[in-house]
Image (cartoon, grey):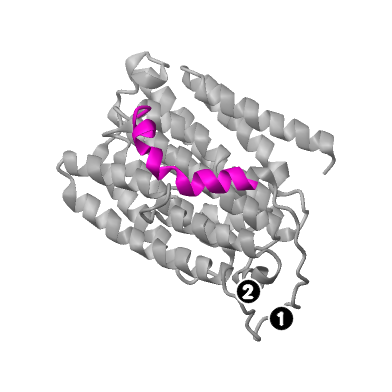
Amino acid sequence: MTPQEKLIFTSSLILGTTITISSNHWITAWAGLEINTLAILPLIAKSHHPRAIEAATKYFLTQATASALLLFSAMMNAWYTGQWDITQLTHPTACLILTSALAMKLGLAPFHFWFPEVLQGSPLTTALLLSTLMKFPPMTLLFMTSPSLNPTLLTYMAILSTALGGWMGLNQTQIRKILAFSSISHLGWMAIIVSYHPKLTLLNFYLYSLITTTVFLTLNTIKTSKLSTLMTTWTKTPALSTMLLLTLLSLAGLPPFTGFLPKWLIIQELTKQSMAPAATMISLLSLLSLFFYLRLAYCATITLPPHTTNHMKQWHASKPTSSAIAILTTTSTMLLPISPLILTTV
């Protein structure tokens, strides 16, 4: 793919995202989502590998279905209420259809099946866009319509997402699939709180995007997509592997790191809303994902490559790490002490 083509597709992605997040009318929001979908498809299929073509086809079919459902819910609401404004979604059937459409766009259970397959067929940089930037427009629509959505339904979907994201990631060996199930699990935490404290959902999404960006860029630097190759990276880049370990622990939500902040705030808010059982359940289910984060972290920092791999031992090449990864890693692990400052924005 030529630099000009990359520039066009990246500009279209930014344009589509900007149109959706700044619109008040359902039609313009839908148009922005369509621009986004069409811009990312060439980036998924750019390697011309059958797996990439399959991923692009799956992504197109799922997103087209979700867009059609979103437009249908908007039209149904306009038919009954005469309102095309995004915040004026009041018809209960339209709200139900919109919840399904946004869940399909985001990859929230039970509409999550497409996401691991698409991520596995995409290059690491495109997988990063799919996990972060492409979820931003539907997340803003979820934020804007949150007062109209059914909190009980969202709670059930959130707990199901966290459970499935944890269970299905346990036996994976492909890193992109593990990160896809990690994303599904994190979406559960965002969905459970959106009806009660929408700004907390956005804060969780921003911090998740920050940490996931760090993980994907680190993996892209060390050119790793499988656990077996991750085991041999310590000989090449010990410092980067150590930082990957800390970032993965932050993604898991362990206390001294940035990733603990949104989980802590969400559990606190759920307890205030008299939803202690839901908070307990989602916390226990997140221990499932903790297992595969620890597995990834262990593989990243294992000092001796095992003899069972088919990969040749890598030469120790000390490449300078980019400053972007250094800054991202620092923020991904060390923002917890300034949490009072972050809380002033929520």
Instruction: Check contact, mark 2 vs mark 1: CB within 8 A.
Output: yes
* Kind of residue sitting beneath label 1: Asn
Q: Taking 234 as reference, is 24 above or below it?
A: above
Badge 1 is on which residue? 310
Q: Residue at x 75, y 72 (%)?
A: 314
Q: Quadrant of the C terminus?
A: top left
On the question of residue 54 being in view, the answer is no
Segment tinted magenta in the rendering = 325-346
Badge 2 is on which residue? 228
* Kind of residue sitting beneath label 2: Ser
Mark 2 or mark 1: name the one nearer the start of the chain: 2
Q: Residue furthest top?
A: 82
Between 108 and 231, the residue placed more toward the observer is 231
> Does residue 328 belong to the magenta stretch?
yes
Q: Residue at x 39, y 38 (%)?
A: 338
Between 110 and 293, the residue placed more toward the observer is 293
The kind of secondary structure the magenta stretch mainly shows is: helix
Q: Quadrant of residue 339?
A: top left
Left or right of 268, for residue 85: right
Q: Taking 327 as reference, is 308 above or below it?
A: below
> Does residue 32 belong to the magenta stretch?
no
Residue 238's x, y, as percent?
64, 65
